[in-house]
């Protein structure tokens, strides 16, 4: 599975051409391998602001057929455990939810332009790889 974080979603919605092309290449590779492309509901809080620009976000999610995974109790608990492992606070909660979804799914690639925090979290998960779309 490919999980898109907020930078990856922003890229497909209205990002710079180079970043958008990198994300689309990852998505194309996943489609070729018949693997899902997804994000986590909490990530939407980082990219949706109740403005006309939100249309680009929703259009990109639809166009790329991005599944949205919920944050349920299982994900919340796993995210908390990951935050505890790296001794971080709730400022990294959205990243932790993303890695938790990846971990609970048995592994995934997480596309981001901000690798450092996600890599710290992923180092305590199984088969979670962070891909730089920078």
Image (spheres, helix red, strand yellow):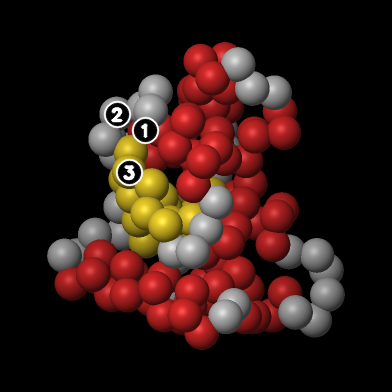
Marking on residue 37: none
Report if the CB atoms under discs 2 and 1 are less than 8 Å apart: yes
Coordinates of residue 44 in the picture (x, y in percent): 65, 56
Residue at 72% across, 74% down? 54
**Label 3: few (<14), some (14–19) or many (≥20) C-alpha neighbours in 10 Å:** some
Coordinates of residue 64 in the picture (x, y in percent): 42, 75
Foreground pick, 121 / 97: 121
Residue at 44% across, 64% down? 133
Residue at 49% across, 56% down? 112
Marking on residue 129: 3
Whole-Å distance between the Cαs marked 2 and 1? 6 Å
Mark 2: secondary structure:
loop
Coordinates of residue 92 in the picture (x, y in percent): 65, 34
Marking on residue 103: 1
Asked whether residue 104 is in view, the answer is no
Whole-Å distance between the Cαs marked 3 and 2? 9 Å
Which of disc 1 and disc 2 is earlier in sequence?
1
**Label 1: few (<14), some (14–19) or many (≥20) C-alpha neighbours in 10 Å:** many
Q: Is residue 61 above or below residue 80?
A: below
Q: Is residue 44 above or below residue 23?
A: above
Coordinates of residue 126 in the picture (x, y in percent): 29, 29
Q: Is residue 88 above or below residue 36?
A: above
Mark 3: secondary structure:
strand
Report if the CB atoms under discs 3 and 2 are less than 8 Å apart: no
**Label 2: few (<14), some (14–19) or many (≥20) C-alpha neighbours in 10 Å:** some
> Left of 26 or right of it: where is 46?
right
Mark 1: secondary structure:
helix
Marking on residue 126: 2
């Amino acid at each position: 599975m490919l999980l898109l974080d907020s930078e990856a979603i922003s890229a497909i919605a209205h990002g710079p051409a180079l970043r958008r092309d990198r994300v689309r290449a990852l998505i194309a590779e996943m489609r070729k391998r018949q693997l899902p492309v997804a994000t986590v509901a909490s990530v939407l809080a980082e990219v949706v602001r109740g403005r006309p620009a939100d249309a680009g976000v929703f259009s990109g999610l639809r166009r790329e057929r991005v599944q949205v995974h919920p944050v349920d109790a299982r994900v919340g608990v796993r995210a908390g455990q990951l935050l505890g492992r790296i001794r971080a606070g709730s400022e990294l909660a959205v990243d932790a939810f993303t890695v938790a979804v990846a971990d609970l799914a048995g592994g995934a690639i997480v596309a981001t332009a901000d690798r450092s925090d996600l890599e710290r979290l992923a180092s305590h998960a199984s088969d979670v790889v962070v891909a730089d779309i920078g």
